[in-house]
Image (tube, rainbow, N blue to C red):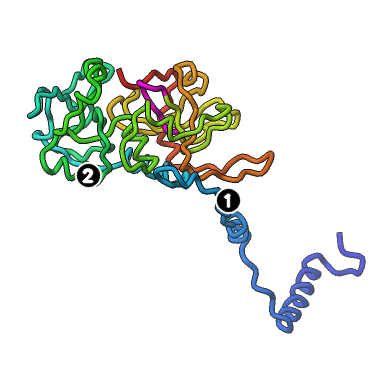
Amino acid sequence: MGQPNGTTPWLNFTMHLIDLTRLTSQHPPMKCLPLASLLLATSCVPVPPPVLVPGDASAPSQLTPGESLAIAQRLASHAWRPFAHNILHGKDKAGIVVNTPDISHEPQHERKGWWVPGEVNTGVPYKWGGFDDPATFDAAIANGLAGGDVSSPAKRRADNAAVSTQAAGVDCSGFVSRCLKLPTVHDTTQLPALCTELPSTRDLRPGDVLNIPHRHVLLCAGWSNPEHTWLYYYETGGGPDYWKPGLKQAPLDALLALGYQPLRYRGMARELVPSGKAPQEVLTRGVKATAVVVPNPTVGEP
């Protein structure tokens, strides 16, 4: 059907197009961002860093949760290349029995070895009594020291007398001590003296620790679900990869049933969180994707 004035729809469209051309020639159009660019710009507004209250100045070290988890990730992702001379299954020069967690160590058992000589491996290996950082570990491996030394009931009974100076790596307390920037290693019986016990496990934040004196210690890395029933944590000496550090997630109730105590290091800066708000997450999405799911955690070291 024609228009009331007798013109056709096509003619009307053509006349409007001519008018629009005249208008834009007199008033150049504004330059507009494409919709995708506009959405990107509005979605990339930087999130302001959290307001942190410094830790206790009398503590042996000062650090933030972000720094603590960054150290943990460096130890867990450190690349190194060992060789056959870094393997030891027997007594070192002082007569201390050493078993490196290389691929030949008890492959038929749950707590089997993992690193492969001649190849690039990832993660500073477990060493009973170890307190290495990546630099000191690399130097030790280059000098021919053993690449780690697994825990055992015999070593636990002997305690410090079973620590070999001919092996390199970190054990559970050495790992957490490094992640807290402590100048010397503090074992699971010494760490509580540097910490404050949390009134509730609901108060756990990245950089806190879960400790069992005389047994094992974990580094809290944040909540893995909104209900705060699953926890991200770093450890070395625990399953399923017993003799290497790594990021894991497990049910909080299962961890508490093992006897872990929630502690906060006194030198750790804490975030000021407004009422009703949650603290900012520290782990990135990419790092979270690497976390091993451990539905039934056990105390790591035998």
- Residue 57 seen: yes
Which quarter shows the N terminus? bottom right
Residue at point 18%, 32% (across, down): 116
- Three-letter amino acid code at the position of disc 1: Val
Q: In which quarter of the image is residue 179?
A: top left
Above or below: residue 107 compared with residue 88: above
Which residue corresponds to the image point at 47% horizontal and 35% vertical from the top-left? 208
Q: How crowded is mark 1: few (under 14 residues within 10 Å), some or many (20 or more)?
A: few
Q: Farthest bottom residue? A: 26
How far is the residue under mark 1 from the one under mark 2?
A: 34 Å
Q: How far across and down, in percent of the image, does residue 175 sit?
A: 33, 35
Residue 98 is one of the magenta-drawn residues: no
Mark 2: few/some/many CA within 10 Å (<14, 14-19, 20+): few
- Please provide percent x and percent y for residue 144: 10, 39
Height in image: 72 above or below 296?
below
- Residue 268 vs residue 96: left or right? right
Count of numbered tags:
2
Percent across and percent down for residue 93 are: 7, 29
The spot of residue 80 in percent (x, y) is: 21, 42
Disc assigned to residue 51: 1
Left or right placement of residue 26 versus residue 53 in this view: right
SS for tag 2?
Answer: helix
Label 2 belongs to which residue?
136
Is the residue under label 2 in contact with that under label 1 (CB below 8 Å)? no
**Quarter of the picture holding the C terminus:** top left
Which residues fall within the magenta stretch?
Answer: 212-220
